[in-house]
Amino acid sequence: MQDYLIRAVGKKGQFRVIAAVTTGLVEEARRRHSTWPVASAALGRTLTAGLLLGANLKGDDLLTVRVRGDGPLGAIIVSANGHGDVRGYVQNPQIHVPGIRPGKLGVGNAVGKGTLSVSKDLGLREPFTGSVELVSGEIGEDIAYYLLASEQTPSAVSLGVLVETDNSVRAAGGLIVQLLPGAEENMLAELEDCLNRLPPISSLVNEGKIPEEIVKLALGNLDIDIIDNTPVRFYCSCTRERIERMLAGLGEQELRDIYETTGQVEVICHFCGEKYNIQEQELGKLLQDIKKE
């Protein structure tokens, strides 16, 4: 099944819903970062949340989600745009914590207590950043609390990742339902009641359900209009040229020290795990370019 995201609104304009299947991109992240199951689930939920939150961004606007807990996973950093691109990493990808029960990974215990922050770079002088305390570390509840406390948007959030016994990602996806201004007072309770009866998102994706079907199951008899659908993918904007510019930014002396001591350098992108080997000849050219400037 192709990974994609849909946006929809209630026909009475009282709420909007964003749903996505993200199995392929979460598996890509697992492969790139060699994550163990609990890290795959935590990172996968955060990657999916980043896409759902970024779905309403315009142009080249960017959104960054940072989960900083005191648990063994460390920080989780995810960056997404409005075109369906997302990338991210977890600080400690290979840790194990006991599950809550069979089939339920201990993501909350692995994340621990701390903060969740969301930054939106909208092309202004400074990005907008909101931050809240983590409610549970399960990511979905924390995103819902952030939306209410920081953006004053009552929301219901469901995120899920199903990990196979061989550590691969079998199913992943997510759903956000948000009240719009002017919604009736009982609408959020009605939406939450619908979502409370919804099976886990990962189970639905595992059954082959597509985003449209997940939304239909989630909202029952509530009428919606689907606005659009967008393919989503794990995509990192790092390039060899950017890495070389970063090395040049170290300055002539530090770059010369690397050139004279090791003759080469390996740079690994945190976001995607891509390795860039810069050889002696390339380092020498960077030094010459710095001198010319």
Image (cartoon, grey):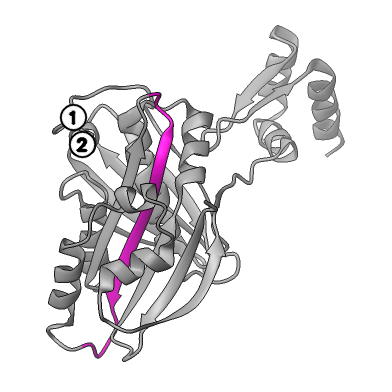
> Residue under circle 2?
104
Residue that lies at the very extreme toward the front in this rendered image: 207
Image quadrant in which you'd find residue 85: bottom right
> Residue under circle 1?
99
In the displayed structure image, the side of residue 277 where residue 107 appears, left or right: left
Instruction: Give the residue drawn at x 34%, y 40%.
Output: 162
Seen from the viewer's position, the closer of residues 284 and 237 is 237
Q: CA distance from mark 2 to mark 1?
A: 6 Å
Is residue 172 within the magenta segment? yes
Image quadrant in which you'd find residue 258: top right
> SS for tag 2?
loop
Q: Look at the image and give the residue range highlighted in magenta.
A: 166-183
Q: Amino acid at mark 2?
A: Lys
Tag shown at residue 270: none
Instruction: Give the residue drawn at x 42%, y 48%.
Output: 47
Quadrant location, the C terminus: top right
Categorize mark 1 by other alpha carbons within 10 Å: few (<14), some (14-19), many (20+): some
> SS for tag 1?
loop
- Does residue 151 appear in the picture of this structure? no
Residue that lies at the very extreme toward the top in this rendered image: 261
Name the dominant secondary structure of the magenta segment: strand
Q: Amino acid at mark 1?
A: Gly
Residue 221 at x, y = what percent? 25, 80
Is residue 241 within the magenta segment? no
Q: Is residue 203 above or below residue 29?
A: below
Q: Is residue 5 above or below residue 216?
A: above
Seen from the viewer's position, the closer of residues 22 and 234 is 22
Residue 267 at x, y = what percent? 62, 25
| Mark toward the start of the polypeptide (2 vs 1) | 1
Image quadrant in which you'd find residue 123: bottom right
Say whether marks 2 and 1 touch (CB < 8 Å): yes
